[in-house]
Image (cartoon, helix red, strand yellow):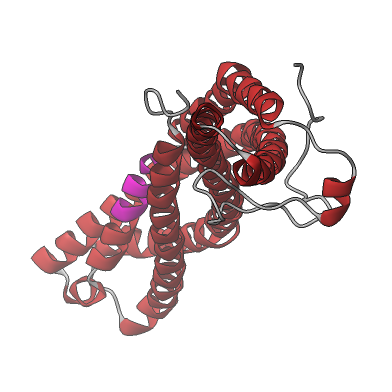
Amino acid sequence: MTDLMPESAWAEPAATPPDFSESTCPASLAQPAPAARRAGRRPAPALAADVNELLESMARKRVPRLDAVRQRLQQSRAVLNLAQIEAPLQALHAATTAIDFLAGRQGGAAGAEFLRQGLALTAAAAQWESRMASFLQRHASGVPVTRLVGIDLVLESGSLHKRVRQGAHWLAEMDQDLLRRRRTANSSVASRAIDELARRAKAMHERLQAVHRLCGHARRVHGLCEEQAHARADLCETLQLRVHPASHALVEALQPLLQAAAYRALVPTELLGAIDARHALQVELTQAGAHLARLHAGDRELAMQLASMAPAPGHLG
């Protein structure tokens, strides 16, 4: 038997799919529609052979291909390392918070400390600017790759899902044929043969359920990848359009103050612009931190779902 269904995306067919619920015998999935029953009944042994070949085909080809996509997703997660931007962002936040504008008004040793704090902030801002540029470049180059891997995830898991539906339909037909055979069985030999077919159907049912769960994990992974992509885009926008200009504004506001603090105490009116600029930067840094927290939470959930997709030894055996 060859591959049964074409490649598919997430979209469901118009008909309601058979589910994995209980039925009149342990191996059943869902009962076929009346029209299908009237279309011609196939014997349980032939259906069992088809379902087994379908399962073997999935285990041999489709499941390994989906696992290869899972591994590519894990690799793409490693490329977009949040620590690359998080550490310098935290250092910039700490340096911004540490500035004591009152010390600048006092002169002397306090003024020297203010000068040191201002220079530390200038260095932290320069370090952050460098890391931000690298991070944004990595993000821009990684987005198309991640998007292509996401498309592959949809195609491969969609193809598996269609085969699961086909196998569920065949097992439902097999269930009905076994029920009819039990009603007409008139010997112990026939009953044992029916019991053996029912045992095989139950085992194939469990294998099909494993693939069904794998498709569910793939769906959740795809959804999480989409959410993470939007969250990363929001972070990059905040960094580039809000934190960057706010950081630049504070550094620019500090420069004349640092020059003056080197030889005299500052007056209150000189500090107002820099104080406002620091507050504006702190607001943007807090927003960026919130984006990072959401990304970390999403990444932990994504890691769990990717781990759930990893094939266990013999899970389709």
Do we see residue 155 in this rendering?
Answer: no
What is the chief secondary structure element of the magenta stretch?
helix
Q: Nearer the viewer, residue 119 or 56?
A: 56
Region in magenta: 83-91
Which residue lies at the image location 69% right of the left edge and 40% below the top edge?
177
Q: Which quadrant of the figure has residue 270?
A: bottom left
Residue farthest along the bottom direction in this orientation: 269
Who's the residue at 32% across and 83% down the image? 268
Please state which of residues 4 and 28 is positioned toward the viewer in this rendering.
Answer: 28
Is residue 82 depicted above or below 235 in this figure? Answer: above
Say whether residue 139 is left or right of residue 280. Answer: right
Counting from the top left corner in percent of width and height, residue 191 is at 52, 34
Left or right: 58 with respect to 310? right
* Quadrant where the N terminus is found in the figure: top right
> Furthest-left residue in view?
109
Is 40 part of what is drawn in magenta? no
Quadrant where the C terminus sits is top left
Residue 110 in percent (x, y) is at 13, 68
Q: Is residue 39 visible?
A: yes
Total number of numbered labels?
0
Residue at 77% x, 49% y: name it.
11
